[in-house]
Image (tube, rainbow, N blue to C red):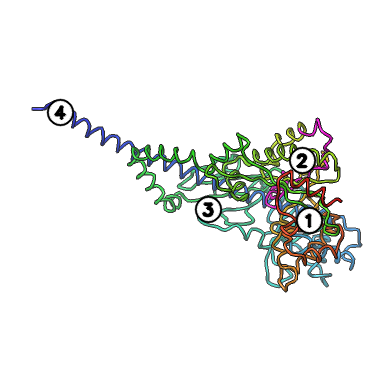
Amino acid sequence: MVTARSLARFNRTWLFIAVVALGTLAGFLVGRQSILRTVEAHLANYGEQLEQHAEEVASEISSTLTSANHSPYPPCSNDEITFFRKLTFAAQFLKDVGRIHENSFVCSATTGNLATPHPLLKPSIHGPRNSVIFNNYPLIVPSGGRGEIITYGQANVVVSPDTFAEFSQGPIHYSIGLIDRSTHAFIPTRGEHFSFPPELLSTRKVLSVDGTLYLARCTNRYQICAVTYIREADVWQNNRILLVIYIVTGLIAGTSCGVVILFAGRRRRSHTSQLKRAILKGNLSVVYQPIVELHTHRIVGAEALARWTDEDGDSVRPEIIIALAEEEGFVSEITRFVVNRALQELRPLLESNPAFRLHINLAPSDLADPRLLILLDEMLQDTSISPSNITFELTERATSDREVAVASIRRLRERGHAIFIDDFGTGYSNLAYLSELNVDGIKVNRSFIATIGTDSVTASIVPQILALAKALNLSVVVQGIEREGQVTYFAGGDPHILGQGWFLGLPVPARSLRYLCTERSE
């Protein structure tokens, strides 16, 4: 006889089984979808990197060929060959620049004048703007070598075989190629040569064909396409443990709810949440580290630095503050807080001293934040503070996106603000990089300064950095000054060099900074 109690037990058993089954199925489906989306994001990111790099290479090829075609010297003269060598030396992705006459090589930067013109073979690709590409072409130098040659007009360049060496292969594979202008077919020039669906080039979506995920990114400017792909078998092979974790998570969904509730309670006291609350309540503070003219020991500026004490009373290091904010995407809020607080606290000093420069650090996301410019307009509108009082500092990492960085720097400089590259020497530093960014000054990284007076290799780099700054007419702030000998070293070389460091002054509140400025001006 079936009793109500046994029926209820039966129902609870089946309900438990159903919940476990649904949880397991949900874990599997969510895990599968999540893994696929992650892989698609990797394909897209990898393809974007390839596309951007390919555009950089194509841009350099185009500009070099244009320069070679407009050579001011007689063809294949000693002056022109020297000119070609300068072009080759300045290029990042090219190995040779040469001259073509009547469809034959006649001279180049590496070969000099050929005794006998070297006829061109059949081209592989008819590229954009009447350029011609030769793949796997036998080179004259080095003898027996092969490479990619691109010709345009009466000039040619040899592309370095290591142009895409930094892009590893597997499990995601790639192919870089061009759309032939005569056949409209995709012809690979770098990476792997593989066949893929023709419709792939007309969409920017991931396509799954015969157990393989494909994604293509093509540029209109140079007719270059970057195709990335991964076999679905590799996807599941590499993520099988993750998929099992999703399934197990589905099995323990009930327990996960309790864990989520517990985690939510803890998260309210997490540093990230605390930092957000501190920004909303204005509980951060700003201190100012003096920037000193080394020759006179006069304070000519200060760097504004955010400080924070968490809800447990512990002081949090500045790098952790920025790392937390960047990770969660609200670092621009800290920047705006620093701007607002610093201009309020230092208003009397800035209004009375037009030459004083307040240095404020910008994160990569700040470059695209229109609210920062609006805040600056509002803060400066009713004051006598000049835009030249405010200098912005960018790390070299923040300028890795050249297009955004150049446009943002131009806007800030047009408004009267100076721009410095912070921690110079640790990233992308080179002459072309600084010339393109068009900044006002650099702050030399402290790692180079610590070795002054020693035989360290980094110490020998300092004169080169200073020479580069002088050649580009850039102001220089030396960071990490901790000894008198370092002050003497730099002050004796250039009276206009500025310094910053513990020896010259610790980060202090606004009131203390105003006092120090008054004291040292007497």
Depth order, front residue of 290/415: 290
- Numbered tag placed on residue 346 in the rendering: 2
What amino acid does circle 1 point to?
Val
Percent position of residue 513, x then y = 76, 47
Query: Which numbered circle lies on residue 5?
Result: 4
- Report the residue marked by disc 3: 172
Closer to the observer: label 2 or label 3?
Answer: 2
Between 117 and 277, the residue placed more toward the observer is: 277
Seen in the image, is 381 located left or right of residue 125? right
Label 1 sits on a secondary structure element that is strand
Decide which of 110, 448 is in the foreground and name it: 448
Q: How packed is label 1: few (under 14 Cα within 10 Å), some, or many (20 or more)? A: many
Query: Of helix, strand and loop, which one carries label 3?
Result: loop
Q: Which residues are magenta?
A: 379-404
**Which comes before the other along the chain, label 4 or label 1?**
4
| Viewer-closest of 261 and 230 | 261
Q: Is residue 395 magenta?
A: yes
* Residue underneath mark 1: 477
The residue at the point 87 percent across, 60 percent down is: 495
- Residue type, label 3: Ile
Kind of residue at disc 4: Arg
Q: Quadrant of the N terminus?
A: top left
Q: Is residue 391 left or right of residue 308?
A: right
